[in-house]
Amino acid sequence: QVQLVESGGGLVQAGGSLILSCAGSGSIFQSNRMGWYRQAPGKQRELVATITSAGSTNYAGSVKARFTISRDNAKNTVYLQMNSLKPEDTAAYYCNANLATIATTGDYWGQGTQVTVSL
């Protein structure tokens, strides 16, 4: 059974930093594109950042220059370093990954981790 398990969320003051981690487990043959999305109360889920297996990155305009996505292919893990956090960054953050097993390839989601930024 393939799973994505996130960690690292929490409460932080504006201007602070957090690191989110998302580790894939199970019979993963290869991790392809990985990324982070977020959803604030009453809003749609939105893309935060993605990274390909080769290391190419893409960021939402609202987080560019503040957030950094990275990955460890050997561990099927993706990270999100979040600096200069703002109250508007408050949301549930979800990890997403396109993972290949011996049997299939598909998109998987983590359970979400809450990030709350206070004034």
Image: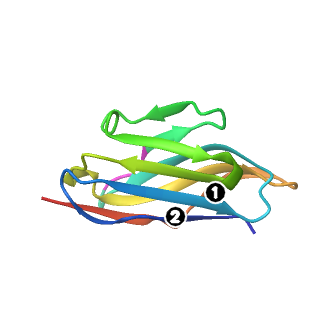
Give whichever of 69, 90 is nearer the camera: 69
Identify which residue is drawn at 87% across, 55% down: 103
Q: How many marks?
A: 2
Quadrant of the drawing holding the N terminus: bottom right
Residue 32 appears at what percent x and percent y?
Answer: 69, 42
Q: Answer yes or no: do the residues labelled 2 and 1 have beta carbons within 8 Å?
A: no
Dominant secondary structure (helix, strand or loop) of the stretch shown in magenta: loop
Q: Is residue 69 above or below residue 19?
A: above
Q: Give the amino acid at mark 2.
A: Glu
Residue that mark 1 sits on: 108
Q: CA distance from mark 2 to mark 1?
A: 12 Å
- Left or right for 46, reference 75: left
Residue 83 appears at what percent x and percent y?
Answer: 30, 46
Q: Is residue 26 above or below residue 58?
A: below
Q: Is residue 95 above or below residue 73?
A: below
Residue that mark 2 sits on: 6
Is residue 94 within the magenta segment? no
Residue 68 appears at what percent x and percent y?
Answer: 42, 41
Q: Give the amino acid at mark 1.
A: Tyr
Q: Is residue 9 above or below residue 89?
A: below
Q: Earlier in the sequence, mark 2 or mark 1?
A: 2
Residue bounds of the magenta highlight: 43-47
Quadrant of the drawing holding the C terminus: bottom left
- The circle drawn on residue 73 is none
Is residue 44 within the magenta segment? yes
Is label 2 in a helix, a strand or a loop?
Answer: strand
Q: How is the image coloured?
A: rainbow
Identify which residue is drawn at 24% across, 54% down: 16
